[in-house]
Image: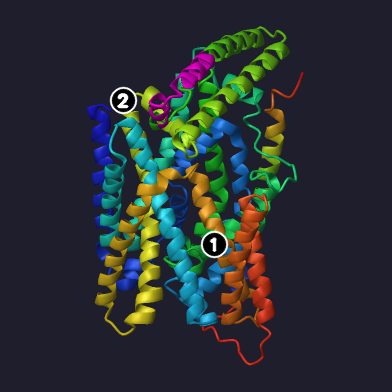
Amino acid sequence: MSEDQEDRVGIFPNWGWVYRTVVIYGVLMIGVLILLSRILGFGAGP
Amino acid sequence: MTSLDWALFALYLVGVLSFALYQSRKNEGVEGYFLGNRRMPWWAIGLSVMATQASAITFIGTTGQAFDSGMEFVQFYLALPFAMVVLCIVFVPIFYRARVFTAYEYLERRFDGKTRAFTGFLFLVSRGMGAGIILYAPAIVLSVILGWDERLTILVMALVTVAYTMVGGITAVIWTDVVQMLMVFGGIAVALLALFANLPEGVGVGEAVYIGGIQEMWRSVDLSWDPTNTYTLWSGLLGGFFLFLAYFGTDQSQVQRYLTATSLKDSRLSLIFNAFLKVPMQILILSIGVLLFVFYHFEEPPLVFSPAEVAAVEESDRAGEFRALEEEQARVHSLRRTATLGLLEDRDRGGDVAAWRTTIGGYDNQLRDIRADAKELVSEVRGTASNDVNYVFPTYIIDFIPTGLLGLLIAVIFAAAMSSLDSEITALSSATVMDFYRRFFRPEESDAHYLRMSRFATLFWGLFAFCVALYAGQLGSLIEAVNQIGSFFYGSLLGVFLLAFFVPRSNGTGATVGLLLGMASVFLVSITTDISWLYYNVVGAGVVVLVGTLLGRDPSERRRSVSSGAGPSQ
């Protein structure tokens, strides 16, 4: 096994999980900002 | 500023200097000076990485930008978490295992000396300029607040930063960055709380968010495909991704940070730390700008925030036009204030607010047009673009922040600037000594000799930054200026490293020719098209990889071995 797979990183079993978490976090961040852009756009409505 | 403000500010300067000297007492030799003997903890490196990127420009320029155009600038940072993952998987292991002093040293092992020298030279030029702009930003604040001479302010800042960086090297830099970054977090919190506290009675968080939303100031994502628009989701994800790969993966000011870690795991953790914290931090800083926009619904803002620009127009023969615009702004502002209070009252009563929103939106647009006309007038009178955006936040803190907190916020702006400047000059010093002086001029000298030269190089780059800072005022929005300077070099530099990592048949000649053509392509694109500068990094990197791959077919040149391994899987 490579070093990437062996190392336990805090609560994560290996680095692969850390990277997946960061990617999901990044996607969620974009989603939340898109949502907030729509919800907080009070000028657009009637 | 009161005595209390001065005392807090002085305490910061003396404290940071003493702390830096105390932390650097165990430093020995060049490895200690540039890499902290590779003993730094990941969280300290993580904060230092963040502090290096978040300069006073971030605090001043970004808030001003959000005041003028809302949260859209955050899109620039959305690719950062993804870039950090690629950096952790590909870049960090290669640099860490190579046991190099600089990123460009790796290129000599992979390619040849001329590639190392060329990339190192580009770094020195671009970041030397960047260091000057970083130094200039807080000088604006003090020139506004205290009426200090800008040049004197620049000199004082450079002296303090260069002093502790010269003596303590990277250890002093990282530990002071930790303190300074914590101060920046505190400053963001103080600024936000002070803004809410300064809103009129009855206007709380919900009302402030609502008022900002009327002009869509919270709109942070633009899904349009227009490549000439700098701040869209796509330019942020694509252009920003390449820019962050280049900045964190090839810029010595960042690479040097994670080379100081005790292990590869710690190096990676320092970047993952940033992957999680950077975007929320930018959101908070931009929110300060949007809340300033809301705040100035209730307090009449200056038509132009920069006193120097106002003075220039008032002394010109177009002063009458400026006064007319001021009067017009006062009139429309008063109407908007009344309408805003009326809207909030009706909203509380559950009444119909649609008409109010339309009216306020109309006043907002009128005020925006008046401000744009005033800025154009300033530009015509002075013959240079208005950089008023950088004066919005400083003006607010002078006029509305209470005693004590004002001194603290000034210290925070200084901390942000100094934590970036120290990193830049220590990185410039390491590249100068390790990539040029030791490599090409004096390869066999003692460790003590190189340490002496490193300190001298730090002093030299501090002086260089000072000289650049004297002329930085001619540039427009500082935050954009720094990133634009980087964009002419960064993409192509990234291309060279991508060649080294992923194209086994590439060689030094291909990398160097590719680098030249990459930069030429970026220049050509910048003068012949209107595409956003964020895409320049993609163009530069793409051209270098293409050219380097094509020229790498030469069978007579064997790929040089790399002692540490040339791929991410090793």
Q: Give the quarter of the figure containing the N terminus of chain B.
A: top left
Q: Is residue B317 magenta?
A: yes
**Amino acid type for the residue under numbered disc 2:** Thr
Does the magenta-highlighted stretch encompass residue B383? no
**Secondary element at image label 1:** helix
* The C terminus of chain B: image quadrant: bottom right
The residue that label 1 is drawn on is B489
Looking at the rendered structure, the secondary structure element under dot 2 is loop
The residue mark sitting in front, 2 or 1, is 1
Image position, residue B479 (x, y; %) = 50, 45
Q: Magenta residues?
A: B309-330
Side (left or right) of B422 relative to A13: left
Counting from the top left corner in percent of width and height, residue B356 is at: 67, 12
Residue under numbered circle 2: B403
Quote the CA–CA distance across marks 2 and 1. 44 Å
Q: Is residue B266 left or right of residue B175?
A: right
- The structure residue drawn at horizontal position 64% and vertical position 45%, both measured from the top left corner, is B230
Residue at left 37%, top 68%?
B430
